[in-house]
Image (cartoon, rainbow, N blue to C red):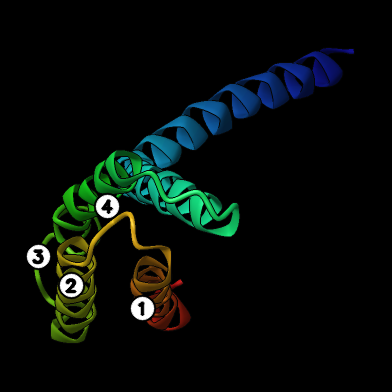
């Protein structure tokens, strides 16, 4: 009986410890996940408006601006020590494509579609290596 009680107490303490460790590990990844989630949300909104054929210039400008803001946070979030120069190259390519997309007329669906495709390709190239 005493061994069963000690076993149950040990399992309970182990479960609590694992719960706390899980929370710590999840919090460690919160910032990078948040940056990617916000970027994905605004890029997705841009793609949905393009797929719907409705290119509202102001909505597109705002979504591109958010994608640009979040791209500036990729290096601090995912490569804080700037140890990986190849990663920096992917981020610079993405930034260049976002800047190019912001210079095209956001209400021009065909031009914006091409720009969004280029941004998506830059994201995909990095994700193939680092995801």
Q: Helix or strand or loop: what does disc 3 sit on?
A: loop
Q: Helix or strand or loop: what does disc 2 sit on?
A: helix
Tag 3 or tag 4, which sits nearer the N-term?
Answer: 4
- Give the image quarter of residue 14: top right
- Image point (20%, 86%), residue name: 86
**Residue 100, labelled with which disc?**
2
Tag 2 or tag 3, which sits nearer the N-term?
Answer: 3
CA gap, disc 4 and disc 3: 27 Å
Residue that numbered label 4 is attached to: 64
The answer to the question of whether label 1 and label 2 lie on touching residues, with beta carbons closer than 8 A, is yes
- Image point (9%, 65%), residue name: 81
The residue lying toward the viewer, choosing from 54 and 65, is 54
- Image point (36%, 39%), residue name: 30
Q: Helix or strand or loop: what does disc 4 sit on?
A: helix
Residue that numbered label 3 is attached to: 81
Residue that numbered label 1 is attached to: 118
Between disc 3 and disc 2, the foreground one is 2
Neighbor class of circle 4 (other Cα within 10 Å; few <14, some 14-19, many 20+) is: many
Percent of width and height locating residue 119 = 34, 71
């Amino acid at each position: 009986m005493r061994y069963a009680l000690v076993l149950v107490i040990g399992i309970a303490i182990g479960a609590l410890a694992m719960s706390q460790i899980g929370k710590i590990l999840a919090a460690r990844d919160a910032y990078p996940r948040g940056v990617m989630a916000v970027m994905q949300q605004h890029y997705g909104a841009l793609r949905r408006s393009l797929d719907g054929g409705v290119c509202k210039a102001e909505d597109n400008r705002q979504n591109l601006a958010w994608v640009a803001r979040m791209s500036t946070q990729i290096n601090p979030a995912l490569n804080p020590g700037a140890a990986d120069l190849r990663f920096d190259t992917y981020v610079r390519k993405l930034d260049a494509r976002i800047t190019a997309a912001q210079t095209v007329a956001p209400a021009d669906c065909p031009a914006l579609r091409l720009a969004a495709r280029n941004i998506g390709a830059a994201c995909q190239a990095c994700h193939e290596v680092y995801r």
